[in-house]
Amino acid sequence: MKTLILNGSPRKNGDTVSLIHIFLEGLEGEYKIVNAYEDGIGPCIDCRFCWENDGCSIQDGMQEVYEYIQVCDNILIVSPIYFSEIPCPALQFAALG
C-alpha cells in the first residue's frame, strides 16, 4: 500500500508534523511526504493547461507528486489552521481535489 502525505505546515517540528509521525506509527507500506514550504512547488496560476492535458504547465516539484498520485492508494492532506484558514502554500494541494 502506498500513501501520499501532503504537509502544509511551515514548522518543521510543530504539532502538524507530530500528528504525521503518530499516523506513520500505524501505517503499513510505502509513503511519501511532500512539504508545501520546502519542495519547490509553486501556486496554481489558473492557466487551465490541466483542463485539456495531463499534469501542469508549471515544471516544478509538483510533477513528481502527480506521478506518485497515479500509483498511490491513499492521500492524506495535513495542515495547521491559522486565523480560520489553511496557510497559502497548502492551498496548492486543494487543486488536487
Image: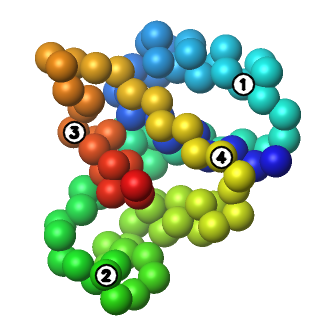
The residue under label 2 is which amino acid type?
Trp
Residue linked to disc 4: 74
Q: Residue at x 17, y 67 (%)?
A: 45
- Of the numbered discs 1 and 2, the one sitting upstream in the chain is 1
Give yes or no for contact between labels 3 and 1 (Cβ–Cβ under 8 Å).
Answer: no
Indicate which disc, 4 or 1, sits on the residue closer to the N terminus: 1
Q: Mark 1 is on which residue type?
A: Leu
Q: Is mark 3 on a helix, strand or loop?
A: helix
The x and y percentages for residue 40 are: 39, 53
Check contact, mark 1 vs mark 2: CB within 8 A: no
Of labels 1 and 2, the one closer to you: 2
The residue that mark 1 highlights is 24
Label 3 – label 4 distance at C-alpha: 23 Å
Q: Nearer the viewer, residue 61 or 79?
A: 79
Cα–Cα gap, marks 4 and 1:
13 Å
**Left or right position of 85 against 65:** left
Q: Mark 3 points at which residue?
A: 88
Q: At which x and y percent is residue 50?
A: 34, 79
Local crowd size for mark 4, using a 10 Å CA cut-off: few (<14), some (14–19), many (≥20): few
